[in-house]
Amino acid sequence: MVAGVLAPASVDELGGQLRDLDAHHRMMIRGLGSTLPSDDDRIVVDTMALNRFVHRVDDFSVTVGAGVLWSALQEQLARVGQRVAVDPPGVGTVGAMVATGARGGLIHRYGGVRDQIIGMTIVLADGTVAHSGSTVIKNVAGYDLAKLFAGSRGRFGIIAEVIFRTRPLPETQRTLLVPARPDRVRALVHEILGAHVELSALDLVDDTLSCLVEGGHEVIDRRLDRLMRALPDTATERLDEPQSLAYWSRLRDLQFPVEGGLVFSLSARSTVTLDLLPMMRSTLGSSLAALVAHVGAGVVEVSVAPGGQAHRLLELREMLSCAAGEIRARHPLCSFDFEIPSSALVTHPPSAEARAGSTITVRLLADRIGMALDPNGRFR
């Protein structure tokens, strides 16, 4: 049974509530889809009432509360012909999307959600309210807390508000489907990228490369024609706008866990990822429900059926550890967090004052940041 639920309606109210709590009370942050623990005495912080929305249309930026639904944010922006250029799978709040480092097919051109953030308001464990970044797109002096908190999964504090850069909503879109046998994927990707057509997404699904082209009505078909001319010996399928929208919606659904299953998010250098795909399929075998590879970004989303999930994670981790990669698992009820061996990580040699012969791994660095921002472990 939880010890209580906080449902602040503003950032200042949230800061005051945390300051009034006992310093050793542990907390859980809940948005739309988080599940309440049944055997825990944590305080639950419900962020759904943090729903401020301020859109600066001419500046191409928007300030939005952590409790706003991601779909509602995009619908509001679309009314004036703008969007945040991230297309994550599933449903959830802005806070959840940022805390999990959400990404989708548009990562190929625009990056993930962290790449769209220009500012953030954070509430630390002791109730301190911190601001980072700006409401306009420019270089800002100081440490970029927003990048630190994006993908932190609530370890360091509560994401209360986020400032995103927005982009013009494309007038239309087309998709080109390119059959890609495993032994031809690398060559086809090279030919596609060599066409010098700006792609918004380039995904590999079911031995098919999916090329998303967005733009104005007057130019988009010419772009697609140029892409097709770069593949003269390949049978391709062209999807018009309604078909394209439906197709990419289906791909997002594939990246959501089947009932009782998991979605693994794996990443490495894009060239390495292409080589690892056959081994991923072989390792997962019959437990593989779906695989969507954002090949240009080196990111693979793998949906696995129930059973043996931790075992599968360990096998994939061993595979990626040789390629300087990482693995994460997403699930409504749990998350797995494995440390990749330090030999496979980018490491920073310690100063002379540090322990001789040691290296600082990513996980150790995250633990130290957590101790600095949350010394009593309220969010851990």
Image (spheres, rainbow, N blue to C red):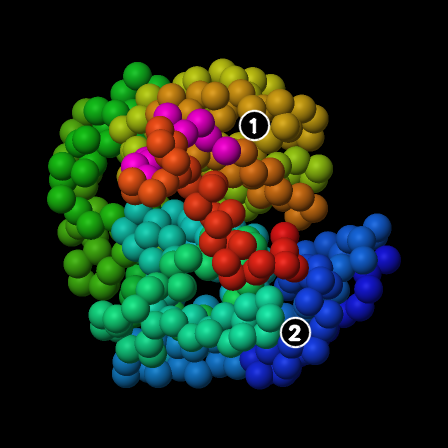
Range of the magenta residues?
Answer: 339-350
Left or right position of 80 against 369: left
- Front one among 288 and 338: 338
- Front one among 334 and 182: 334
- In percent of width and height, residue 125 lies at 60, 66
- In percent of width and height, residue 298 lies at 34, 36
Q: Secondary structure at mark 1?
A: helix
Which residue in the protein does label 1 denote? 313
Residue type at mark 2: give it.
Answer: Leu
Left or right position of 280 against 309: left
- Picture quarter with the N terminus: bottom right
Dot label at residue 251: none
Dot label at residue 18: 2
Picture quadrant where residue 189 is located: top left
- In percent of width and height, residue 352 lies at 29, 40
Q: Secondary structure at mark 2?
A: helix
